Amino acid sequence: MSSSKNNILIRNGRVIDPASGFDGQADIAIADGAIVGVKDIPADFSAQQTLDAQGCIVAPGLVDLAARLREPGYEHEGMLDSEMSAAVAGGVSSLVCPPDTDPVLDEPGLVEMLKYRAQKLRKARLFPLGAITRGLKGEILTEMAELTEAGCVGFGQAEVPLTNTQVLQRALQYASTFGYTLWLRPQDRDLGKGVAASGPLATRLGLAGVPAAAETIAIFTIVELMRSTGARVHLCRLSSAGGVALVRAARAEGLPLSCDVSINSLHLTDTDIGYFDSRARLSPPLRQQRDREALSAALADGTIDALVSDHTPVESDAKTLPFAEAEPGATGLELLLPLALQWGEQSGAGIRRALEVVTSAPARVVPAVGGARIAAGEAADLCIFDPAHEWQVSADALKSQGKHTPFAGYALRGRVRSTLVGGHVVYQA
């Protein structure tokens, strides 16, 4: 074992492994990209590199189920390189990207090229979603089997609602037959055309509203079709109390339904739009306090599986416009960990659940990621962070090319010191 060039010993850290419940001081030995010992280090192990994690927490690398990398097609908004750098700086070792690139991820060659370019960068692991329909046009189903072979872990329509219920039913039947998962953002096309959540604030500001029914009607339809097809569905970025109630009922019934919530919807409400602040122009739109409380409770009790960054780098020209005209989206990869920790503390869910919703819980949604566990034999995808380090969110401090976030100016606690992917140190502060 001692002959490997890449043996790493992580010493003096507090190891938290949400999957097993382990939480305690322990050293971790890594050889050939895998963990070979936690606490009990093999006698013949010798390290070429030692990382001192004194005062830090060692957790599994984060798994982000919603991160747009803007490639292929939007290279000026977020080159693969800069967004992958943002990911590892945020402790994210695995990320899922939606298919709304340009061209759309609807052909195996495009998926293979994207995966190859990501692998060459040797930063985070990339797990693409394929498009359900060609060109995301909602008409003709893609060749899901070929896309799966090329490396797709599921299929979605990104932000484009599937308006033809028959096409949705066919997609679910096909997915059910072959064991694929459909990733659906529940939004009714006709009700979802506004720019802010329906309510007193949108009315006062004169902004076109998106009622919560835009989400719940879509969930009703999806759940009804899940019952008849038996397909597995992941709902992306739940935003309303009504949506939470429907998911809770569907899961109680035993339907194979998982879901996530974004850091934006978990921490902010429509009042954060303030005076037409386009940084808070998001999709789904920020809703009211009761929705935020319902989402927080559902994340704590496991009704919602995962917390996601919903990372969407938007260039300044598209963001510094009047609120209703601004492109929706915000950067989030580097904020996922501190905002998860803040939620764990403020909600009373605790640090173990806060780390679980960004590590082992999202990994269960995408089995291809692996277990996101800290145990002998597991891949050495790890995040070492200082939980006490306070820093202020500013555009200059972000590695992403997307500099716009509604959390700008916030003081957050939790700073990544090192990120390891496959036993390689891919980021060091």
Image (cartoon, rainbow, N blue to C red):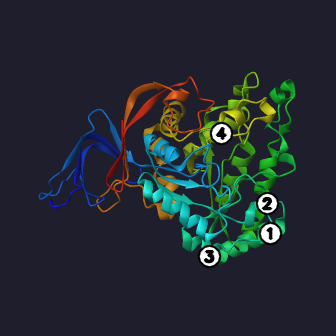
Furthest-front residue in view? 76
Q: Residues within 10 Å of mark 4 (few under 14, many from 20)?
A: many
**Helix, strand or loop for disc 3:** helix
Q: Residue at x 12, y 59 (%)?
A: 44
Q: CA distance from mark 3 to mark 1?
A: 17 Å
**Helix, strand or loop for disc 4:** loop
Q: N-terminal of the two: label 4 or label 3?
A: 3
Q: Residues within 10 Å of mark 3 (few under 14, many from 20)?
A: some
Query: Is there a contact, CB below 8 Å, between mark 1 and mark 2?
Result: yes
Where in the figure is residue 160, as x and y percent of width and height? 76, 54
Horizontal side, residue 373 vs residue 29: left or right: right
Q: Amino acid at mark 3?
A: Ala
The residue beneath circle 3 is 145
Let me know if residue 153 appears in the view.
Answer: no
Q: CA distance from mark 3 to mark 2?
A: 20 Å
Furthest-left residue in view? 44
Q: N-terminal of the two: label 3 or label 1?
A: 3
Give the numbered dot on residue 167: 1
Q: CA distance from mark 4 to mark 3?
A: 32 Å
Q: CA distance from mark 4 to mark 2?
A: 24 Å
Q: Amino acid at mark 2?
A: Leu
Q: N-terminal of the two: label 1 or label 4?
A: 1
Q: Amino acid at mark 4?
A: Val
Where in the figure is residue 307, as x and y percent of width and height? 56, 45
The residue beneath circle 4 is 314
